[in-house]
Amino acid sequence: MYDGLSRPQCSVLTQLRISHIGLNSFLHCFHLGPSPNCTHCHVPETASHFVLACPLCCQQHLELIHKVGTAHLSLWLLLGVNSDPKPVLVFVCDNGRRLC
Ligand SMILES: [Zn+2]
């Protein structure tokens, strides 16, 4: 899964897989953010919410669906050991969030 990826890309993938990434739900656990919730949706901003559900990322979700080839996305499908990690890495990069 990590072959051919840069060190920062490997880091982002690992952090997404273990949900220890610079999203509000994780940051709030360490008192690094005022709320665990997404500022737009007011639900916990987890890796799952960020990658699969947040309407702020609607255009990136459509592009991710197109690249993966199914609208039935899941973190397992995107981040599993046999998954191509590039679509989700592009999603994170295009989103513009500073997550690491
Ligand atoms: Zn949201």
Image (spheres, rainbow, N blue to C red):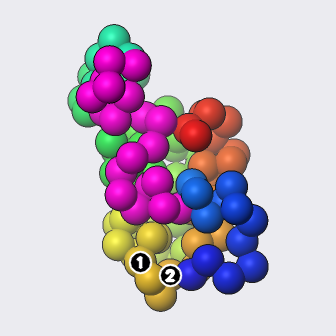
Q: Is the residue 32 above or below the residue 45 in the image?
A: above
Relative image position of residue 68 (x, y in whole percent): 55, 74
The C terminus, quarter of image: top right
Q: Is the residue 60 above or below the residue 38 in the image?
A: below
Residue 87, located in which quarter of the rendered image? bottom right
Asked if residue 30 is among those painted magenta in the image, a careful observer would answer: yes
Relative image position of residue 57 (x, y in whole percent): 52, 40
Circle 2 residue: 83
The N terminus, quarter of image: bottom right
Of 9 and 52, nearer the camera is 9
Circle 1 residue: 80
Q: Along the horizontal axis of the image, is 27 left or right of 65?
A: left
Relative image position of residue 29 (x, y in whole percent): 27, 28
Question: Mainly helix, strand or loop, the magenta region?
Answer: helix
Which residue is drawn at the image coordinates 35% and 66% (left, top)? 74
> Which segment did they paint magenta?
13-32
